Image (spheres, grey):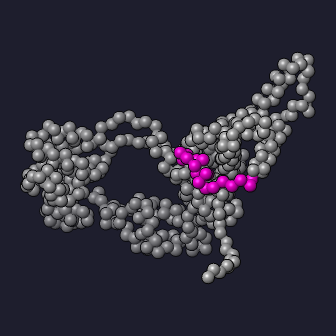
Amino acid sequence: MLHLTQTQKLQQRLSPAQVQYLKILQLPVIQLEQKIKDELELNPLLEEGMEMEEEQDERLDMLQDAKVEDATEVPTDEEVAPPERVKESSDDTMDKEIREHSDEEYSWEEFFENNEGSSSTTQYWDEDDGREAPTPATVTFRERISEQIQMLDLTETELLLADAILWNIDDDGYLHADFSELLHDFNLENEIDLSMEAAESVLHKLQRLDPPGIGSRSLRECLLVQLELMPNVSTPRIIALRILREAYESFEKKHFDKLMQELHISQDMLKRAFDVIRTLNPKPGEGDGVVSVNYIIPDFFVHKEDGEFIITLNDRGVPPLRVNRAYKEMLLNQRKRISTETRHFLRQKMEAAKWFIQSIHQRRNTMLAVMHSIVEKQTSWFEKGQGYLRPLIYKDIAEDIEMDISTISRVVNGKYVQTEWGVFELRYFFSEGISTDDGEEVANKEVMAIMKDIIDVEDPRKPLSDQALTKILQDRGFNIARRTVAKYRESMDIPVSRLRKRLV
């Protein structure tokens, strides 16, 4: 039996124009320029140029037509409206045309088909794939080693194994794959029974090619290969070999006293041996890949002029956009006989062009509003630099400019600003606060900077533990826990005190 019920529910729906605006808002300036190029290629109604230029061209055409009809008659102001009035009239006509067809619905499928091939359907970090400037041809370490392998005195089977090992080496130059499993798979694939001893011999020869240590299975093996290939037979080199072979665990944990006791050497000799080890390359495969240089292009410029901060949006590479006049006239002119299909296509493209232009303008206004609010909240930092950053969260900016937090996140993510103190990511200006004994709140980034300064001047022979760092910071008035100090230290990629110990 059928039952009819009536329910109410609240749903949030985004129009295609809103979706497009949100995607454009999160684009950094480089991706925005590429996005505009894509749209110009895909939408025939969208073109570069100021709207004023279009109306001036229209006025010149009217003047030329009037001169042809009557050389002595000049159009009056009523006949030829000024650019502003013509623009207003043209926009009114366009809006009227859109209103007349407002009852025609456009599905999501039509919207995305209309943007087929456009980068708007993908995330912005995927749009620059294959669009970077061409890089010079280089030879990778795998290609270099492959050429050297051919010069080794190996059998055909051993050459095949060496090639299999080579293509299992990671980008850092290490063979992280299990060697016994690699050999087992190799034997099965080639229907042979190569022994582990013969395979180890092939790996041993491969590791001694250039760069030395390539294909090592551990850091210890990599360093030992490089030490063994050193031409000199100095005492520090011999001690370094003994350290890696006989006391690697103490070396790894930097137990200097234990090393001197086990090897019966002085502190000076231990330091000289460590100096030799420091000259070795811990990642033999690093730095031999294809070079790709990434430059940071700031989205904002902030400078002080006459006591006030001037904020400029970096849109010098963003061209002005307008709707093509010829296609617009074709759509608006009812006397021109065009098929329903063509008219529907032109109307879709006009809608897409208007939405795109409006999204660009709205993006500019939103980004400037967010940047103005950040500068206002962090005025002390922009005036004085490091040491004056205040606690700030997205919610503070959202409440200030009356926008959603997700909008602030889209503006901040991946955007940079050039200031008097350098180029900074917008995320830099957001941080949690830490209370001081005076009742004030200091940004955690400032506490991290202070902590790093303390570590930089510590005694390398007795580095400060996390508990000691906590005590020093608390003595300076920062109410901070030891686990927070450890979290800050790890976020700055600073190792624990034991690994910071050095011989001087």
Residue name at image x 13 percent, y 54 percent:
187
Kindly identify the residue that appears in the image at 67 percent across and 40 percent down.
342
Residue 323 shown left or right of residue 242 in the figure: right
Q: At 65% across and 81% down in the image, what residue appears?
A: 3
Residue placed furthest toward the top: 71
Q: Which residues are magenta?
A: 102-119
Task: Indicate whether 250 appears above or below 95.
Answer: below
Residue 220 in percent (x, y) is at: 20, 57
Q: Is residue 350 visible?
A: no
Q: Residue at x 24, y 51 (%)?
A: 168
Residue 106 among magenta residues: yes
Q: In which quadrant is the C terminus drawn?
A: bottom left
Q: Residue furthest bottom?
A: 1
Q: Nearer the viewer, residue 251 or 318?
A: 318
**How many callouts does the rendering have?**
0
Residue 109 in magenta stretch? yes
- Can you give x and y, in whole percent of width and height, for residue 462 in the image? 33, 65
- Whether residue 87 appears in this view of the structure is yes
Q: Quarter of the image for the N terminus: give it.
A: bottom right
Is 334 drawn above or below residue 119 in the view shown?
above
